[in-house]
Image: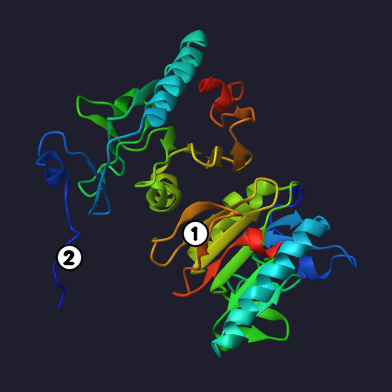
Amino acid sequence: MALQQKQFYTIEDIYSLPDGHRAELIDGQIYNMAPPSTTHQRLVFRLSSIIDNYIQQKNGICEVFISPFAVFLNEDDRNYVEPDISIICDKNKLDDRGCHGAPDWIIEVTSPSDPQRDYGIKLFKYRTAGVREYWIVNPLKKTVMVYDFEKNLFSNQYNFGDDIPVCIYNDFIINVSKLI
Amino acid sequence: MLLPQKQDYTIDDIYTLPDGQRAELIDGEMYMMAPPKRVHQRLIHQLEKRIGNYIDANGGDCEVYPAPFAVFLNADDKNYVEPDISIVCDKDKLNEYGCNGAPDWVIEIVSPSTERIDYGIKLFKYRSAGVREYWIINPVNRMVNVYDFDNNEKTGQYSFDNDISSCIYNNLNIKIADLLL
C-alpha cells in the first residue's frame, strides 16, 4: 500500500531506506514493495531467459535486466522504479546505478497486494516516459495485458495459452503457458 | 513540406456515411464498427438496466445511454465515439446529437474487431478527455479491466465472478456473471 505521510519524497529517501527494505517512487510518492512469491520469481526468470535467448540468437544489442534494477524513469529525483523485467536497447542510458530514462520494453508480474500500481499508475507513467512496450503478467488470472505504445497494433488482453506477439520484435512470439 | 494526411477525417465524414454504416473517429482516424454479437447486446442491456435502476433507486441525476450514442469526446471535430455504455452526470453536456465532452463513466464490451482500440487508444483518450471511470469487459476471457482515473484505488483486473465495485458510486457492486444467468 502507498504511504502518504509526507507530500513529496525524493530518490534520496529511497537510498536511505533501511537495508532490505525496497520501495518505488512515482511522482514523489513512495510505494513499498512486498517480497515476491515463487510463482512471481519463476515467471520473471523464465520470461527474462527466453527474451535473453532471443536477443543472443539474433546478435541483438538490447539487454535484459531483472529486478532489483533501478530505473530513473524521468531522469529526475521524483521517480524511481524497479520493473520486474526491463529491456534496454540504448547503452547510453546505462551506468552502474541503473537505467536513466525509459527502457524500451517493461514487463511487470502483478502481486496480489497492489494491482492498481501496475494496471494504473505505472501504465500511464511508462507510456508518457517513452517506454515502447509494456506487459502486465497476472499469475492469478492467467492473463497478459500488452500495450503497444509505439504502433498500437498489438495492444490487447491475452491468456497464458495464447501466442503473444512481441511488439518491438517482428518475429518473436511468447506463449507463457509453455514457459511454466 | 507538410503532406495532407489521409487519416484526417472529420465528424462530417461520420455523418455522411451510408445509412446503416457505423464508425468512430479518434484523432481524425476512422475506425469502422462491426455489427455486435448477441452476448455483447445482452451485456449492454443488463448493465444499462442494473446501473439505471441503481441511479433511480438513489435519486441520482446521472443518465445512462447505451450505444449507438454519440460522444464528441473532446468537443472538437476530430473525435467521435460510440461507447457501449455512457453514464453522463452533467446535463449541460447533453444535446440532441449526444454528449459534448467526456462522460463520467464509460463501459466498452470488447469484440475481436475493437479489442485493440478498447484496450489501447481509447483507454488513453478517455483518460485524457476527463472520463472518471472506464470498464473494459471481455466476454471471451471473462475479464473486466477497471480504470479508476479519479483516484486509482479500484484500478485492476477482475473476473466475471468478482463483485466489482464502481468507482464513481461507492455502493454499486456488479457481478458480471449474474447478468448472464
Taking the image as shown, residue B114 lies to the left or right of residue A145, namely left
- Left or right position of B41 against B31: right
On what subunit does the disc labeled 2 rest?
B
Q: Using a 10 Å C-alpha cutoff, classify the residue at mark 1 as few (fewer than 14 neighbours), some (14 to 19) or many (20 or more).
A: many
Graded by Cα atoms within 10 Å as few (under 14), some (14 to 19) or many (20 or more), the crowding at tag 2 reads: few
The chain carrying label 1 is: A
Residue furthest out toward the bottom: A59
Query: In 3D space, how far apart are the residues under numbered discs 1 and 2 (Cα atoms)?
Result: 25 Å
Residue sticking out furthest to the front: A178
Give the percent coordinates (x, y) of residue B49: 44, 16
Question: Residue B11's spot in the image, x, y percent?
Answer: 17, 44
Whether residue B52 can be seen here: yes
A17 or B33: which is nearer to us? B33
Q: Quadrant of the C terminus of chain B?
A: top right
* Amino acid of disc 1: Tyr
Q: Residue at x 49, y 59 (%)?
A: A147
Q: Residue B146: x and y, percent?
A: 55, 39
Does residue A168 sit above or below B160 in this rendering? below
- Residue A147, which numbered label? 1
Residue in front for this viewpoint, B91 or A38: A38
Q: Which residue is mark 2?
A: B5
Residue type (three-letter) at the residue carrying disc 2 = Gln
Is B49 left, or right, of A71 in this rendering? left
Nearer to us in this view, B93 or B63 = B63
